Image: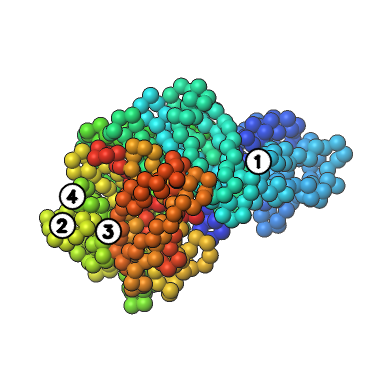
Amino acid sequence: MALDIDTFSNVSGGFSFFKAVGHPLAAPKIRALLDRLEGPVALYDPAGHASAFASLHDMAALPIGGVYVQDLGALGRVVLDRPTQPVTALREDEPASVLVLAFDADRLIEHIRHLVSDGVEIASLDAARLDDAMLTRPRHYLDPINFATNFAFFRDSDTDHTRLVTANYWAGYGARNTRIWFRLFDDAGQTLAEWQQDLPDGVGSVTVDSRAVRKRFDLPPFTGQLFIHVVNGAGHDVVKYALDTYGDQESVLSCTHDANAWPADLYAGLPAPEEGGQVVLWVQNSHPCPIPAGSIGLRQMGQQEFALLDREIPAFGSFALDVETLLPDLKWPAQVEIRAGKHFVRPRYEVRSPTGRVRISHPNVERTDLSADPGIAEIGNLLGKGYLLPAPILPIGRFRTKVLPTPMSTAQKSLPVTALLYDSRGRQIGEHAFGNLPRDHRALLEIDSVLNGSAAAVLESGYGHVELVYDFADGGTADGWLHGLFRYEDRATGHGADTSFGAHIFNTVLTYRNEPQSYSGPAPGLSTRLFLRLGAAPQETMCHLIYPASMPWNAASDTHLLLYDGAGTEVVDRKVEIPCGGSLHWCYGELFDAAEKAAAGAEGYIIIRDQTCRIFGYHGLQNGGESFSLDHMFGF
């Protein structure tokens, strides 16, 4: 059963109503409101929120007398199993109480007060408002900046830990007195702890370590989720972060990033388990209502039927779904599609290898609003490679690199894809035509097979990058939402990392369908601001920067690695150049000396800035030669 809520539109962005009525602090207030209303209750739904509200809150015991609307275009629709009536009909229906399903409802109440008898209570969702101290703009309750919230997978056991790192990037947009309210839920959805953290005045770093939280609140071992609410933000209502998982044993190390705060109907790019291994999907309920049994499902990509999870998951609860329990015969490199029904934000999955090593990563939102675009096949003469998806070829001597194209929209019945390989200087060194892949393909590319053992000859630096591009030589269609899963393995230890992302048009002044994408204005996006968190000792931070170009652009980048301390004060500006179409693989200790690192301190971070081109980046950690992590970076 899918929730009937609006969460995100690629035209208008995120919706805030579902966040407002689903907020952990609002839920008990809403329950108290519903429990005290006398029936029959007239539901006045001026903005069309009734179905979404009922999806998140149990209204079975509410004695509803009728549903009323203001817009005549909504008249006669069936809402909550009742045909809507004009709000003017309240005069004849004589309810005992009226519930206005809106916030900032004073004027709405004034407009209808004359329609009901004296003594009839007219309530609204303002009874469930968060306190003004939790709001950035109290006068406009549903302003998205009031609900700059997100969830993070969060775990601390006697051996395994998590570490969330971000920066007060809101200060860069003029925010002041910014703070974060946290609530930690266990796997049953019960509150373990809540606290507030004041952020630095400048663009300083923010770190939440599970070990410190567990010690501070004297908690038992837990696996659950951390709810994050930013107060007094500016510029961004999106809460971005890097999340590391690490263990007392060297076999546990991985990194991922923010959860994407808008629950979706479908997710894709979940890998099936290797032979002898395990893949666990963490189903973490993002709402104050249970997920009914049979609502969550998995199926092999390209197949018709979902295998359903016959288990209820409590409000804000978590459940470790072993993929094998629903799809017992499916093995890597097959892919899994997730029926989520808008019950949870982009989830984490955990790969447990046959050797006992553990890492986490994430699937991606599968778009349901796209269709094939014939124009993509026609823009090559003006945009060269057009849409491309870049990913590292990590140093060949230590790592294997594997590439798996992943369908990521319901419109993608086939994938016409080629992989192009480049050395660090931007010279093409190989190519692999996948052809026109079917939706249920298992076409895994191992980069070693393209290099044919000649890595030393073609990769002078030992590393490079691969780009997935559209190739219509064998037919097929495209919608611009090309994705891939990139898997990396240490040749000696077998430790692995997964990362996945989608294609964009890079570094051309011509634009197509809002590409090259810009996060701070209209296309084209031709500059870079990436956040690089620094790992805690003894872990060493590594970074792989790629300068992709759909068409030839500036011959070399003008990239600045700006090292900051934890308060957001710049320590040093280290300039590097990356050839157009090339890449740069580096470690923190290689480019910054001991004095600079000491000045940055344990809470320092790096901003990667380039005003001449768009750089795509991947970050990770290395624990000596034993384990590593890798995921793509984010900017703000």
Label for residue 616? none
Q: CA distance from mark 3 to mark 2?
A: 13 Å
Could you say which is closer to the camera, residue 483 or residue 338?
483
Query: Which numbered disc covers residue 465?
Result: 3
- Mark 2 or mark 1: whose residue is earlier in sequence: 1
Q: Earlier in the sequence, mark 1 or mark 3?
A: 1
Q: Which residue is mark 4?
A: 397
Q: Quadrant of residue 502?
A: bottom left
Q: Nearer the viewer, residue 180 or 17?
A: 180
Which residue is at a point 31% across and 34% down the rendered structure image?
252
- Where 462 sits versus 56, above or below? below
Q: Quadrant of residue 296?
A: top left
Q: Earlier in the sequence, mark 1 or mark 4?
A: 1
Amino acid on which the number 1 mark rests in the picture: Met
Identify the amino acid type marked 2: Ala
Say what secondary structure mark 4 lies in. Answer: loop
Q: Would residue 304 be seen by someone viewing this image from the given angle?
A: no
The crowd level at tag 1 (other Cα within 10 Å; few <14, some 14-19, many 20+) is some
Residue at disc 2, secondary structure: helix
Residue at the image point whose x is 40% and y is 26% from the top: 157
Mark 4 or mark 3, which is nearer to you? Answer: 4
Coordinates of residue 205 in the picture (x, y in percent): 50, 44
Circle 1 residue: 134
The amino acid on which the numbered mark 4 sits, given as a three-letter code, is Gly
Packing grade of label 2 (10 A; few <14, some 14-19, many >=20) is: many
Earlier-in-chain disc, 2 versus 4: 4
Q: Secondary structure at mark 3?
A: strand
**Residue at position x 26%, y 47% in the image:** 488
